[in-house]
Amino acid sequence: MSNQVFPILGIDHLEFFVGNAKQSAFYYSRCFGFENTAYRGLETGDRKTASYVLEQANIRFVLSSAMSAAHPIAQSVAQHGDTIAVVAMAVPDVAIAYQCVVNRGAVAVIPPTTQSDEFGTFRYAAIRAFGDVLIKFVERQHYSGAFAPGFVACPASGRSGAGLTEIDHVVGNVERGAMDLWTQFFMQTMGFDLRMHFDDQTISTEYSALMSKVLQNGGKTIVNINEPADGLRKSQIDEYLEAHYGPGIQHIGLSTSNIVQTVLHLKQSGVEFLPIPKTYYENLESWVNEIDVPVEKLADLGILVDRDQDGYLLQLFTKPVGDRPTLFFEIIERHGSRGFGAGNFKSLFMALEREQALRGNL
């Protein structure tokens, strides 16, 4: 039974705080196939920040940099490196959503705010989540501009995208012992339901382990929360928390309807993926015959396969997209399965540990 306390229509956008938004926009455009659709900066009269809006199908990123070292964005980058700082959720009424979450114990950051220009009215508010991450509520039903007041539309480049279609899920890492606290926060304040729980026996190797809970509000708004578990060595979550200097967004799952073509595009554009040992594919033949993609092609591209009672999924993970081993992306194609590749956890974890060892962090 749904625990929903107000409607969440989906993820409106994710805002990245970065050291150089112009160069980051170029990277996500050229490597991931995003289109720069809107801009705000010095040329539009903003003397404090520069922001680039990138879109691909139903995915929207906003990349923001500060113009001075004293600005909170610059301070965030100094501490965390490039990071996803804002998860913006679309709601039908910002005032109702804000009042609801604050009444239920959320820490208010930005009260309901209205901005207007010739394209209509745009409303937003924000609360604090784990670490320095903000949850932003956005109401744009009465706004027809490029993104929001203060932004100007950018000319279309004419380049084709990579076939990415929507944000499948958002994954946050929190410190040991905090997963249940933040699970309750999302359930209590925003009406998320607990959908799945993976313990340290499910997600573990010889050396390290983690625990994870999957939360869902409505049909598509999915937030996963991870915490480290006891292990012989440092887990990927421990490494993230050290490199990020605190909790934050670990990775974003991006959907595609043709993972082979998407991954080929991304690889040819310079995106690096976690290498998967060829031994992973030796035993797939017995149960993947329902999948259109030949096992040889899966092995060539490093695509993982998992199946549950509802169907199957194909997935793979990029290496971290910055110098710090923090943020990365998952590319996922679903065929009925609404899981998260539980059958691949061990293979994925071992691949992550090999990368950790190369960095001297295992």
Image (tube, rainbow, N blue to C red):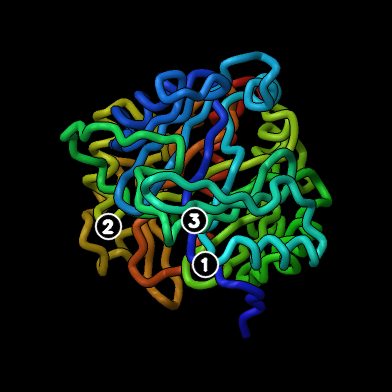
Earlier sequence position, callout 2 versus callout 1: 1
Q: Position of residue 263 (x, y in %)?
A: 29, 41
Q: Tell me the residue that label 2 is attached to.
A: 257
Q: Position of residue 110 (x, y in %)?
A: 69, 46
Quadrant of the image occupied by residue 67: top right
Q: Tell me the residue that label 1 is attached to.
A: 92
**Disc 3 to disc 2, how far (Cα)?**
19 Å
Who's the residue at 59% across and 57% down the image?
223
Earlier sequence position, callout 1 versus callout 3: 3
Position of the C terminus by quadrant: top right
- The amino acid pointed to by label 2 is Ser
Q: Position of residue 214 (x, y in %)?
A: 61, 63
Local secondary structure at mark 1: loop
On residue 11, the disc is: 3
Q: Nearer the viewer, mark 1 or mark 3?
A: 1
Would residue 140 be found to the left or right of residue 183 on screen? left
Q: Nearer the viewer, mark 3 or mark 2?
A: 3
Who's the residue at 48% across and 71% down the image?
219
Judged from this view, the residue extending furthest toward the left is 158
Pick the front one: 71 or 212:
71
